[in-house]
Image (spheres, rainbow, N blue to C red):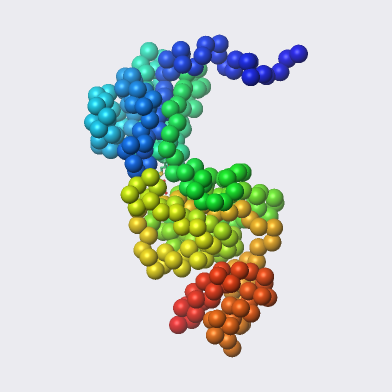
């Protein structure tokens, strides 16, 4: 009987550890320098050259760990033109490690084109896994860990951001049921939370901030309540946004706004919240958060 078994060698006959990879992808800390794995230190020390985004950032990591390997910059602006000479050097026997400024290389960071070229050239590519903000935020979010859809950064402008979110929403209407993960800059967090709530509907979410660092925080709440919170407390540091999968029935924010605006014409925020929460079968906390925003907007 044919078929792949756990014993079947895939792609090569030698164990990966004996193949002296031409390129090793090495994950580095996302904030806490104590998170550099011993095997990462060894891979960085053993490489002939370390390719990194910013030589100044990686130089600090190397000096803290007594690593003297030479650094070369590889970033979005030079990756395309560096590929050919790098592949030639790998073919000539040079061994490279690839790191980014933080976390897993390639994940919202440079390196994909080089990895693809090395694979196409038949070179051995390996990795030392380690810290990654998306996976850490997902694990801490309390939201279903899989399936998940890692989006990375949304476009900075609201119109383009909403277009991407609309595409996700239409995939959800077609059956996608996944937890969503986004990277975001602190000064855009509130606008992104607003756009996510308005296009995807209010849902359980979490913001992982400054993960692995001194002021690590994970805030779990509905999208609207998170927007209210971060309007009041200026978000600082690095952050990852995790949004729960589309519920079977989501009252869209348009529906919620219409009901609230009508109720607020004659009622206090408190009474309007109670009435609309009952009417749409939504949690009071979610409705209250939105009612406050609408009152503020009116004012
Ligand atoms: N390659 C990295 C990884 O594996 O996580 C991500 C690089 S991407 C250019 C940087 C973004 O990741 C930040 O803007 C933030 O959204 C997220 N991020 C990085 N470090 C983080 C941290 N300590 N806590 C929360 N989010 C973080």
Q: Quadrant of the N terminus?
A: top right
Q: Residue at x 50, y 58 (%)?
A: 220
Figure quadrant of residue 74: top left
Residue 267 visible, this orientation: yes
Image x and y of residue 55, in percent: 27, 34
The vertical placement of 147 against 163, above or below, is above
Figure quadrant of residue 267: bottom right
The vertical placement of 1 against 35, above or below, is above
Q: Residue at x 28, y 34 (%)?
A: 61
In this view, the residue in front, 254 or 180, is: 180
Q: Residue at x 36, y 23 (%)?
A: 43
**Which residue is situated farthest in the top direction here?**
13
Image x and y of residue 139, in percent: 51, 45
Q: Residue at x 33, y 49 (%)?
A: 214
The vertical placement of 228 against 268, above or below, is above
Image-quarter location of ligand 1? top left
**Which residue is situated farthest in the bottom direction here?**
266
Image x and y of residue 59, in percent: 25, 33
Q: Quadrant of the C terminus?
A: bottom left
Image x and y of residue 103, in percent: 40, 38
In this view, the residue in front, 197 or 143, is: 143
In this view, the residue in front, 221 or 293, is: 221
Is residue 142 rendered to the left or right of residue 71? right
């Amino acid at each position: 009987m044919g078929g792949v078994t756990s014993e079947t060698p895939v792609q090569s006959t030698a164990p990966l550890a004996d193949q002296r990879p031409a390129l090793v992808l090495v994950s580095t800390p996302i904030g806490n320098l104590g998170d550099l794995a011993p095997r990462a230190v060894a891979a960085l020390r053993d490489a002939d050259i370390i390719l990194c985004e910013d030589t100044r950032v990686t130089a600090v990591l190397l000096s803290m760990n007594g690593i003297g390997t030479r650094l070369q910059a590889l970033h979005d602006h030079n990756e395309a033109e560096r590929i050919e000479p790098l592949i030639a050097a790998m073919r000539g026997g040079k061994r490279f490690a690839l790191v980014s400024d933080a976390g897993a290389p390639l994940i919202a960071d440079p390196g994909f084109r080089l990895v693809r070229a090395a694979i196409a050239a038949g070179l051995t590519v390996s990795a030392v896994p380690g810290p990654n903000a998306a996976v850490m935020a997902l694990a801490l979010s309390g939201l279903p860990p899989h399936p998940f859809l890692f989006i990375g950064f949304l476009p900075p402008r609201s119109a383009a951001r909403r277009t991407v979110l609309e595409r996700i929403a239409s995939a959800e209407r077609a059956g996608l049921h996944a937890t969503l993960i986004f990277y975001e800059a602190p000064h855009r967090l509130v606008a992104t939370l607003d756009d996510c709530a308005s296009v995807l509907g209010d849902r359980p979410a979490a913001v992982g901030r400054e993960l692995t660092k001194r002021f690590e925080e994970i805030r779990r709440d509905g999208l609207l309540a998170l927007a209210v919170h971060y309007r009041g407390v200026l978000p600082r540091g690095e952050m990852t946004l995790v949004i729960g999968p589309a519920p079977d029935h989501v009252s869209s924010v348009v529906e919620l706004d219409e009901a609230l605006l009508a109720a607020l014409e004659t009622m206090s925020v408190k009474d309007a919240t109670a009435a609309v929460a009952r009417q749409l079968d939504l949690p009071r906390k979610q409705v209250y958060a939105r009612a406050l925003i609408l009152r503020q907007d009116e004012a």
